[in-house]
Image (cartoon, rainbow, N blue to C red):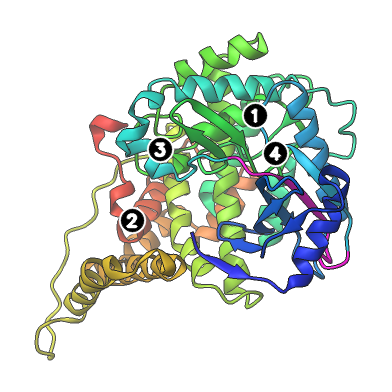
Amino acid sequence: MAVTHAASSLGDGIRVALSDSFGDEITVGEPRQLTGGASRQIWAVDVRGVDGQSQDVVLRRDPPGHGDADRMRAEVACLRAASAVGVPVPTVLASGDTAPGIDAPYLVMDMIVGESIPRKLQRDSEFDEVRTHLADAMGYVLGQIHRADTGTLGMLDAGDPLDAIEAVYRDLEQPRPAVEVGLRWLRENRPARRPNALVHGDFRLGNVLVDGGGIRGVLDWELAHLGDPIEDLGWLCVRAWRFGAEPPVAGIGTREQLLDGYERAAGIRPSEAELHWWEAYGTLRWLVLSQFQSQRHLSGAENSIELAAIGRRVCESEYDLLLILGLLDNIDPSPDVAVPSVHDRPSLSEILELVTGTLRDDVAPVLDGAHERERYLLRICVNLLGIAGRELSAGDRTGEVTELLAALDCTSEADLADRIRTGAVSYADTAVRQLISTAVLTRLRVANPRHVLRPSQT
């Protein structure tokens, strides 16, 4: 795991923060910043008591100067409420709005050892046995979370999640027909709302720690809120969190296993229709959040190749949303037309393919664990080069979409999106379905053709 080193003042701040739990005579090693923190920094540090016994602890803090004390206090409250009902979570050892040397809202907790990388959990032989019951175990843990006492959690948001994600989408001012279809379908088919419970908000592989015995810890409570508990189950079933694997629950199990575990812990079992609605909502939510993340780069607010690359993945969620709503028409693309070129071979698309293959097969494998970040960025570059090569090979298919738009008297996809929103056209109309499917599949077959399911898989 990649680490960086901090000034000693951070270690001093951690030592003072932990004095109530460990006493004044503890010594603290040099903090090591761990990779993986998105909006918050994560530091590991070795703490040694006067008896010579050592313990690894973890500091989570907001970036200095950009703190949200209310949100950090809420995360601490969630961890304690979840722990009280048996949810495996790190023990909070210290927390505060700030401290000398830490200089931001923070919490310190014990370190739980386990694996969180989805592809390892899905494929590595050491997890073969635990995979047979991991979906059930995830359902059981969610049932425990939803039984937590919310009496101390009044600081959490408790609004309508569909209203909230629509507000994010509207603020982007990037109308998309697939999103408008999703919003209308969700409002027309919404199930009765269950009583508010503690909702984790981002429960999926990557945010749980697992070993050969099962789930050892539930992490990252930043998005926790009060709401309909089935939201967490639907989010776990979103196709994006399968990471290419086929089983519908996190790529490791079935919905029946998930619901079996959940029913044992929570005493309720949502219907297939209810779970389906929340899975559709989760897919729409990830679609909009992907738009939001890419816009952070495209607007100039944050220069990031990672965020930029997400912009080409929005069509994956468009496809998934149409698929789960039963509104996807599998349109075959028009045949490629070879365009003569004055240039010698290798062609531009062939050059991109050669460079992509060299970086992927010859350069990436020689980077060791000390270059984890560089390997990650290299994978992004390889993916973007692949997209560029496929787009060149496919040619510009904008004309196909333009013709379908013209048949509906629409000037653009944004125009069609507005008409779906106002009800001027129906998303169930055959011509509308064909147009949206054609546009989404055209984008997806360039961005990530492996994401398109075979007929036998749908």
Q: Quadrant of residue 351?
A: bottom left
Q: Nearer the viewer, mark 4 or mark 2?
A: 2
Which amino acid type is marked by label 2?
Asn
Which numbered mark, 3 or 2, is in the foreground of this view?
Answer: 3
Image coords of residue 383 (percent x, y): 34, 65
| Camera-side residue of 37 and 266 | 37
Dot 2, crowdedness within 10 Å: few (<14), some or many (≥20)?
some
Among numbered discs 4 and 2, the one appearing first in the sequence: 4
The stretch in magenta equals 100-112
Disc 4 designates what residue?
162
For the residue marked with disc 1, what is the amino acid?
A: Pro
Marks 3/1: CA–CA distance: 18 Å
Q: Are marks 2 and 1 in contact (CB under 8 Å)?
A: no
- Amino acid type, label 3: Leu
Work out whether residue 418 or residue 56 is closer to the camera in this orientation and state it: 56
Q: Is residue 325 visible?
A: no
Mark pair 3, 2: CA separation:
23 Å
Spatial separation of the CA atoms under disc 4 and disc 1: 29 Å
Label 3 crowding class (10 Å Cα cut-off): few <14, some 14-19, many 20+?
many
| Residue 105 among magenta residues | yes
Q: Position of residue 56 (x, y in %)?
A: 64, 48
Residue annotated with mark 2: 448
Q: Residue 119, relative to residue 65: is it above or below?
A: above
Residue 350: in sight, yes or no? yes
How busy is the neighbourhood of tag 4: few (under 14 within 10 Å), some, or many (20 plus)?
some
Q: If you read the primary sequence from the N terminus, does the residue marked by circle 3 or circle 2 appear first? A: 3
